């Protein structure tokens, strides 16, 4: 089983709202990733967690706040987003950082 | 640095046509190579991979061979179906603690 799940599928939020995206995997992977994907573009890496610790932050604005509460879960907390943050947010996991990544279905976010 | 170059798209084919999507790469060391597919409205799915020179990855009728001498990983399918309509991303990883480097992606449309 190579399933990564993400909730919600769709999210609409205002610029003053606070919301969270969730990602879960039960493959025993110790690396988890957040990506942002704009239409017709490849995914852009945002954050990497390795063994529940943040190992890479690709200079993402502080209005995006990741959290890894345990080895199966990854959250992305959103606050005071801008309309240009509207995108598909993808979670991925791999056994270790640098190994084959498996992606979730994504959360499609619209910021009004 | 690492980079992946994909042929320009979009590509439109008739059902049962032969498909080739070109992918070349530049990398330090010996990368692992991947093809991911993204169906409309969905996340990325790993289509196939190859981890060393001359390896052939295959899945769902798609094949790609890791060619070190030409630094290429072209995707082929002998007879495409309408259901193969999607965006295809070539990607590489150079091993432990490395990021996934994507090509720009190419949109394939298969008409009945």
Image (cartoon, coloured by chain):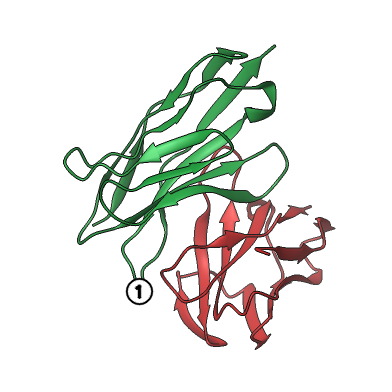
Q: Position of residue B29 (x, y in %)?
A: 20, 62
- Residue visible at 27% across and 55% down in the picture: B2
- Residue visible at 58% across and 57% down in the picture: A36
Give the quadrant of the C terminus of chain B: top right
Q: Is residue A72 left or right of residue A98?
A: right
Q: Quadrant of residue B101?
A: bottom left
Q: Quadrant of residue A30?
A: bottom right
- Which residue sits furthest left? B69
Instruction: Tell me, by letter, which chain the rendering colours green.
Output: B
Q: Is residue B60 left or right of residue A105?
A: left
**Circle 1 residue:** B96
Instruction: Tell me, by letter, which chain the rendering colours red.
Output: A
Q: Is A68 situated above or below B73?
A: below
- Residue visible at 21% across and 45% down in the picture: B68
Name the foreground residue: A47 vs A26: A26
Number of other residues with Cα within 10 Å of mark 1, as a class: few under 14, some 14 to 19, many 20 or more: few
Q: Is A17 situated above or below B41?
A: below
Q: Quadrant of residue B28?
A: bottom left
């Amino acid at each position: 089983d190579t399933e990564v799940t993400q909730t919600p599928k769709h999210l609409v939020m205002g610029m003053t709202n606070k919301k969270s995206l969730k990602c879960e995997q039960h493959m025993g992977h110790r690396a988890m990733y957040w990506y942002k994907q704009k239409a017709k573009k490849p995914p852009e890496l945002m954050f990497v967690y390795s063994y529940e610790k943040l190992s890479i932050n690709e200079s993402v604005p502080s209005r995006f706040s990741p959290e890894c509460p345990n080895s199966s879960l990854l959250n992305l907390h959103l606050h005071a987003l801008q309309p240009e943050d509207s995108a598909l947010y993808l979670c991925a996991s791999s056994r270790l950082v640098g190994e084959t990544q498996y992606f979730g279905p994504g959360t499609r976010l619209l910021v009004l | 640095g690492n980079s992946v170059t994909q042929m320009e798209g979009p590509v439109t084919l008739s059902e049962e046509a032969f498909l080739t999507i070109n992918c070349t790469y530049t990398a330090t060391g010996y990368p692992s190579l991947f093809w991911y597919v993204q169906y409309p409205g969905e996340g990325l799915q790993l289509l196939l991979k190859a981890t060393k020179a001359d390896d052939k990855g295959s899945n769902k009728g798609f094949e790609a061979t890791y060619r070190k001498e030409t630094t290429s990983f072209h995707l082929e399918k002998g007879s495409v179906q309408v259901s193969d309509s999607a965006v295809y991303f070539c990607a590489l990883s150079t091993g432990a603690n490395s990021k996934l480097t994507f090509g720009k992606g190419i949109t394939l449309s298969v008409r009945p």
